[in-house]
Amino acid sequence: MGALRLILLYVHLIGFALLLGGLVTQYLSGTVRINKAVLWGSIVQLLSGIGLAAPLRGGGDHEPDPIKLVVKLVIALMIFVMVFVPRKRETVAKGHFFAIVGLTLANAAVAVFWR
């Protein structure tokens, strides 16, 4: 079970890198849009996050706070919807784009700082 959790965590971090890296790349390119890295990063983050939370529900000393899991799930779902809906548009509004960036960073902050 420990190896599976580490693999899921690794995949989850790759999803974060795809999501945030894709957003930074699009911002630096001057065209604010949703690219494939952002879309796939949001999908990987959502699915691997669910996978990380599911096996840990069995109890034990390191069981995560259920409220934290719900907060992270809600933020991940918001990111996914905000990425999925405008994915085929040539450009997205800068406020929408920066909201995705902010939610991505907020989700990482919840993961790191909420103990």
Image: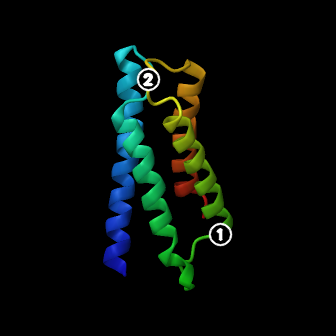
Q: Mark 2 packing: few (<14 Cα in 10 Å), some, or many (20+)?
A: many
The secondary structure type at the circle numbered 1 is helix
The amino acid pointed to by label 1 is Pro
Q: Residue at x 36, y 79 (%)?
A: 2
Image coordinates of residue 3 in percent, x first then y, are 31, 76
- State which tag comes first along the sequence, 2 or 1: 2
Image coordinates of residue 103 in percent, x first then y, are 57, 40
Q: Looking at the picture, does residue 100 appear above or below residue 10?
A: above
* CA distance for labels 2 and 1: 34 Å
Left or right relative to 18: residue 47: right
Q: Residue at x 34, y 74 (%)?
A: 4
Q: Looking at the picture, does residue 60 appear above or below residue 98?
A: below
**Count of all numbered marks drawn on residues in the image:** 2
Considering depth in this image, is 6 or 75 the residue closer to the camera?
Answer: 75
Q: Residue furthest top?
A: 30
Q: Quadrant of residue 7?
A: bottom left
Q: Residue furthest right?
A: 67
Q: Looking at the picture, does residue 25 appear above or below residue 37?
A: above
Image coordinates of residue 58 in percent, x first then y, are 54, 84
The secondary structure type at the circle numbered 2 is loop
Considering depth in this image, is 9 or 31 the residue closer to the camera?
Answer: 31
Q: Mark 1 packing: few (<14 Cα in 10 Å), some, or many (20+)?
A: few
The amino acid pointed to by label 2 is Arg
Residue at label 2? 33
Residue at label 1? 66
Q: Residue at x 53, y 26 (%)?
A: 97
Q: Residue at x 59, y 55 (%)?
A: 72
> Which circle, 2 or 1, is nearer the viewer?
2
